[in-house]
Amino acid sequence: MDERHADDGEGADRFSARWAEVAPAVFAWASLRVPAPLRPRLDPDDVVQEVCCRAFLGIDRFDPEKGPFRAWVFGIAHHVLQAALFELARGPTVARAPALDEGSRFLDRVPDDATAISRRLARREEFARFLDVARELDEEDRRLLLLRGLEDLPHEEVARDLGLTPAGARKRWERLRARLEGMADATGLRLGDSA
């Protein structure tokens, strides 16, 4: 039996445990990535739920030798968000981005505890405070938080994106992480490594 397959109870439990570790980062990422004017038509919770569904359904394609679970999930998250934004850009008549329905039609197969995580996070005051502070960051620091803090991309990749040297990106991340770490810890959010 494929140890990574999520359809059996044991696989669903393994998925739920892994999802619980990464879900706060995905929730914060979606909350910061969905522009405020689009939120009436593109709810960050729906993005997170779609990412969860697709990850659960595709867990047998996850290969830890190709990279960490977090990176794999964020690959899915980027695809889900881009597809949803594309659908919304096609026309104002769409009430909800159809791209958010692909995985969700299999929602009954996803463990309840995995899908309830974003709802719990959305209700937590600490998480709301963290997101408020993150939204107030300047554009470069917010991008740094998204790329290094939430997606946990390597400093070299973050540096290229921000037009910094790797050492500059590392130093800037260490300062930003020190500012946000206590607040992030209170939410259960694990920020990217400082190294």
Image (cartoon, helix red, strand yellow):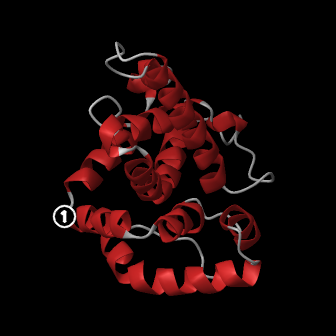
The C terminus lies in which quarter of the figure?
Answer: bottom right
- Is 190 on the left-hand or right-hand side of 186? right
Q: What residue is drawn where x is 33% and y is 47%?
A: 118
Q: Position of residue 28 (x, y in %)?
A: 40, 56
Q: Does any portion of residue 106 appear in the rendered image? A: no
User: Residue 46 appears in which quarter of the rendering?
Assistant: top left
Q: Position of residue 93 (x, y in %)?
A: 34, 12
Q: Nearer the viewer, residue 133 or 120?
A: 133
- Is 101 on the left-hand or right-hand side of 174? left
Q: What is the residue that sits farthest to the top in this orientation?
A: 93
Q: What residue is drawn where x is 49% and y is 30%?
A: 85
Classify 76 as above or below 167: above
Q: What residue is drawn where x is 66% and y is 41%?
A: 4
Q: Nearer the viewer, residue 136 or 116?
A: 136
Tell me the amino acid under the disc marked 1: Glu
Classify 96 as above or below 110: above
Q: Nearer the viewer, residue 159 or 115?
A: 159
Classify 165 as above or below 139: below
Q: Does any portion of residue 4 appear in the rendered image? A: yes
Q: Secondary structure at mark 1?
A: helix
Which residue was labeled with disc 1? 125
Classify 53 as above or below 154: above
Label count reads 1
Q: Nearer the viewer, residue 103 or 7?
A: 103
Q: Position of residue 1 (x, y in %)?
A: 71, 34
Q: What residue is drawn where x is 66% and y is 66%?
A: 162
